[in-house]
Amino acid sequence: MKIKNWGRNLVFKPDQIIYPKTEQEIIQLVKKAGAANKKIRVIGTGHSWTPLVTTDDILVSMNNYQGIIEVDSISQTALVKAGTKLKLLGELLFKERLAMENLGDIDEQSIAGAISTGTHGTGIIFGTISTQIIEMSFINGKGEKITCSPKNNPAIFRAAQISLGALGIITEIRLRLVPAYNLKYEMRKGNLEETLNKLNIYKTENRNFEFYWFPHTMAVQLKFLNQVEEHPRNVGFAKTFNDVVVENGIFGLLSRISRAFPAFAPRISKICGAAISNNIFVNHSHLIFATKRLVKFYEMEYNIPAENFEAVIKEMVFSINANKYRVHFPVECRFVRGDDITISPANGRDSAYIAIHMYKGMEYERYFQAMEKIFRKYGGRPHYGKMNYFGKKDFEAAYPGWGEFMGIRQEMDPGGVFLNPYLRSILV
């Protein structure tokens, strides 16, 4: 059976696909694979563009290993199975009147897949999703169950918070939670120059802030999220129409035109920028963060030091205009608090994340390589699940903890059970 990722840029055929239901099954699987010199990769929902999970050997899906194991409403924590999809997790936590403090804009991933690649949302007081973990367990390459936390095996814990699936198969994750809350989601049309001038105000005066800049224009779509006591509103037909018809249906049609006639891409970007509307939605947090993504695309995303953000954007504007790149997808800009996770892109620095996209089937490499050159100039570190051109030496130079992580990986998986060709090229 051939496996395709969401972006359809990766296709591979594993020798077998296994769907474990218990932790003991996972332990036995790892031990048997190690004894037979077989390799294992674990797949979540396939939302990565990099070949992290590609394998022609054993592919493990955690789709049958989902749910909450226990909830402590007093300490506001929950122990969850690692295969639990974020969408389901949000619903289960809401029933307990709890919620995750922050999320990204897609909820299709498994919780283990999201943390393993450093998935993040936006908001300068929030770190990546991995910073919400207070304890986790995984089965290492020797078939041992390792449980770690900031107090128990702290070095292993920091490495496991973002691990690329290279330390073992994550089975349980204990999350720090908050009481369930509602968010007011306000979308407004803005101007890039004005947005840069007011950036600090937007970041500090809103719980969550991000914006999308449309290339070849000065138009931006501003998104503000703030906690409110209001009841849900505009979340029925209005929200569905905006997500499905406007942001996916109409944009999908324009994208197909852009692919058929690439020279029209700048013009289409201008049409999209001019059509930005103002909307307000209020809903429960786990339902507000997520946005439907039906239009397929290729994506590159880089973390850069927050203080370099404005310089990077200005160089991107100049490069796109000067080279007339045929791109109509907006540039997404988000902001994240720094952390101490061993190979986190946000390690040691408050960060900005800049994501670029190209519609599936359109030529993207010249554009992506040019933007990556700018990101790297300003200390950029790639998102592990998004396209990039980093090799082992690049990772070692950009990530202070890369050597430490490689040592812990060797300790946890000396036989390389969890290494596929891509991981071997950057970790060994």
Image (cartoon, rainbow, N blue to C red):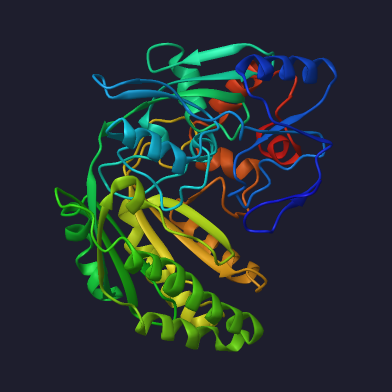
Going 63% across and 18% down the picture, which residue do you hit?
A: 140
Instruction: Decide if residue 55 is on the left or right side of residue 204.
Output: right
Instruction: Decide if residue 334 is on the left or right side of residue 428.
Output: left
Instruction: Residue 246: give x, y in percent of width and height.
Output: 42, 74
Instruction: Residue 52: give x, y in percent of width and height.
Output: 66, 42
Q: Count of labels shown?
A: 0
Q: Foreground residue, 96 or 7?
A: 96
For the C terminus, the quadrant is top right
Q: Please indicate, yes or no, whether residue 215 appears anywhere in the rendered image.
A: yes
Q: Foreground residue, 53 or 321?
A: 53
Instruction: Residue 367: give x, y in percent of width and height.
Output: 58, 70
Q: Foreground residue, 149 or 12?
A: 12
Going 37% across and 24% down the picture, which residue do you hit?
A: 78
Q: Taking 59 as reference, is 296 above or below it? A: below
Going 33% across and 62% down the picture, which residue do you hit?
A: 236
Going 38% across and 70% down the picture, which residue do you hit?
A: 242
Q: Please indicate, yes or no, whether residue 347 appears anywhere in the rendered image.
A: no
Q: Foreground residue, 342 or 50?
A: 50
Instruction: Decide if residue 179 is on the left or right side of residue 399.
Output: left
Instruction: Residue 400: give x, y in percent of width and height.
Output: 48, 34
Instruction: Decide if residue 277 is on the left or right side of residue 391.
Output: left
Q: Taking 246 as reference, is 37 above or below it? A: above
